[in-house]
Every structure is written in structure tokens, then in C-alpha cells.
Amino acid sequence: MTTLTIKIPDNAKVKLSAIVKELGGEIVQTKKSATKSAAQKEAALLKQIEAGLKDVADIRAGKIKGMSLSEALHG
């Protein structure tokens, strides 16, 4: 048998799997793409920005102590 490595859209997985099985083949491994969608990347970035702004507000309110760039880089 021949082994193929291919990339297909997530929504085509079921259809292609059925075709492969119909032809007498087998699915050896399935893994979802590691790339994030634009919406997921945007949501993650928004979370990071919100966390940073909360830290700034907490430092200004005296709830946490800020640190210099030197302290952040060198501990």
C-alpha cells in the first residue's frame, strides 16, 4: 500500500475519509491543523491587551508594585 500525507480543509475530512474507506484504504492518522483562525488570534491578543491594561490600572492604584525594564529583563 502507498501512504499519502495531505492537507485538506476541516470540513472535507468526513467526505474524504468515506472515499478512502470505499476504495479499501484506511486512515492511519488524523490531526487538526495547528494554525489558529484570525478570530482566535484576535481573541487571544485582546485577552493579552486587557490583562496588560488591568496590570497598569493595578499599578496606578497601588495594588501591585511596578518594575523597571531592567528588573523585568534581568530579574
Image: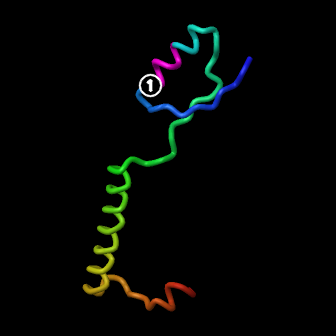
Q: Amino acid at mark 1?
A: Ala
Q: Is residue 75 left or right of residue 64?
A: right
Would you place residue 21 above or below residue 40 in this image? above
Looking at the image, residue 68 sits to the left or right of residue 28; the answer is left
Residue furthest to the right in view is 1
Point 35% across, 83% down: residue: 64
Q: Which residue is mark 1?
A: 12
| Label 1 Cα crowd, 10 Å radius (few <14 / some 14-19 / many 20+) | few
Q: Residue 12 is drawn in which quadrant?
A: top left
Closer to the camera in the image, 28 or 62: 28
What's the magenta region? 12-18
- Name the residue rendered at 26%, 80% in the picture: 57
Name the quarter where the N terminus is drawn: top right
If the image is split into quadrants, where does the C terminus sit? bottom right
Q: Residue 21: x and y, percent? A: 58, 12
Q: Main secondary structure of the magenta part?
A: helix
Q: Who is closer to the viewer here, 9 or 26?
A: 9
**In the image, is residue 17 above or below residue 30?**
above
Q: Quadrant of residue 44?
A: bottom left
10 is within the stretch colored magenta:
no
Q: Which of the pair 11/57 is nearer the observer?
A: 11
Asked if residue 32 is positioned above or below residue 1 in the image, the reply reads: below
| Residue 35 screen position, x and y as percent | 48, 47
Question: In x, y percent, where is residue 47?
Answer: 33, 62
Q: Secondary structure at mark 1?
A: helix
